[in-house]
Image (cartoon, helix red, strand yellow):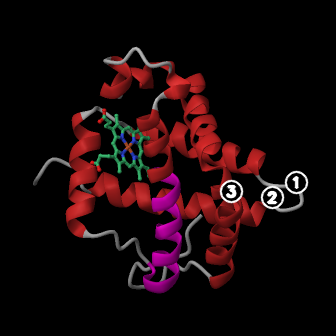
Amino acid sequence: MALAEGNGAVIFSEEQEALVLKSWALMKKDSANLGLRFFLKVFEIAPSAKQMFSFLRDSDVPLEKNPKLKTHAMSVFVMTCEAAAQLRKAGKVTVRETTLKRLGATHLKYGVGDGHFEVTGYALLETIKEALAADMWSLEMKNAWSEAYNQLVAAIKQEMKPAA
Ligand code: HEM
C-alpha cells in the first residue's frame, strides 16, 4: 500500500526505484518475448480484451506476430519504469499532461475499465516474476513494480473521468 505524506505525495524510495530500474535493465534485452508473454497472459485471463484492440480485430496476422501488440506491451513496461523514477523524484507521476490526456482519452474510447487495468497489473507482475532469476524476485520487487504501475494507472484514470 502506498505511503503518502501530508501533501498527498507518495513516498517511493531510492531502493524501490533501483529495484524497478535494475530489473528492467535485465529484462529489456528480451523485450520482444517479454511483451508477447505479457499480453498473452492478459488475454488468457480476459479473452474479451482482444476485441478492444482495433489492430487485432481487423487483422489476419496471428496474435503472436502482431508488432503493435508488442509495442503496447512495451509502452506499459517503459511507462511504469518512468513512473517509478518520477515517484521517487517528485512523489507523484509526472507524465506530460498532454500525454496523460491522450492516454485517458484513448483508453476511455476503447472501453478499458478497472477490471482490465487490474488484470494487466496482475499479468505484468507474473511476467516479471517469470522473467527474472528466482533470487532476484522478492516481495520488495513485487511491491515496487506494483506501486509504480498502480500510480501510473491512477494518473491515467484521472484523465478518463468525464469532464465535470
Ligand atoms: C499503465 C497501463 C497502460 C499504459 C501505459 C498504456 C499505454 C498505451 C499507449 C501509449 C497507447 C497508444 C495510444 C495513445 O498513446 O493514446 C495505448 C493504446 C491502447 N491501450 Fe493501453 N496502456 C495501458 C493499459 C491498458 C490496458 C489495461 C488495456 C486493456 C486491456 C489497454 C488497451 C489499449 C487499447 C485498446 C489501445 C488502443 C489500441 C488501438 O489502437 O487499437 N491499455 N495504450
Ligand 1 is found in the corner quadrant, namely top left
Mark 3 surroundings: few (<14), some (14-19) or many (≥20) residues within 10 A: some
Q: Amino acid at mark 3?
A: Met
**Which range of residues does the magenta coloring cover?**
76-91
Measure the alpha-carbon separation of dots 2 and 3: 12 Å
Residue 31, image x and y in percent? 61, 49
Relative height, residue 54 to residue 71 (above, below): above
Q: Main secondary structure of the magenta part?
A: helix
Of the 4 image quadrants, the one containing the C terminus is: bottom left
Mark 1 surroundings: few (<14), some (14-19) or many (≥20) residues within 10 A: few
Q: Quadrant of residue 132?
A: bottom right
Please name the residue that numbered disc 1 is placed on: 134
Please name the residue that numbered disc 2 is placed on: 137
Please name the residue that numbered disc 3 is placed on: 27
Q: Secondary structure at mark 3?
A: helix
* Residue at 22 percent of width and 53 percent of height: 102
Measure the alpha-carbon separation of dots 3 and 1: 13 Å
Residue 160 drawn in magenta: no
Relative height, residue 73 to residue 12 (above, below): above
**Contact, mark 1 vs mark 2 (Cβ under 8 Å):** yes
Question: Which residue is the extreme one toward the right?
Answer: 135
Query: Which badge, 3 or 1, comes first in the chain's sequence?
Result: 3
* Residue at 53 percent of width and 71 percent of height: 84
Of the 4 image quadrants, the one containing the N terminus is: bottom right
Q: Within 8 Å: ligand 1 and the Cβ of disc 2?
A: no
Q: Secondary structure at mark 1?
A: loop
Relative height, residue 4 to residue 139 (above, below): below
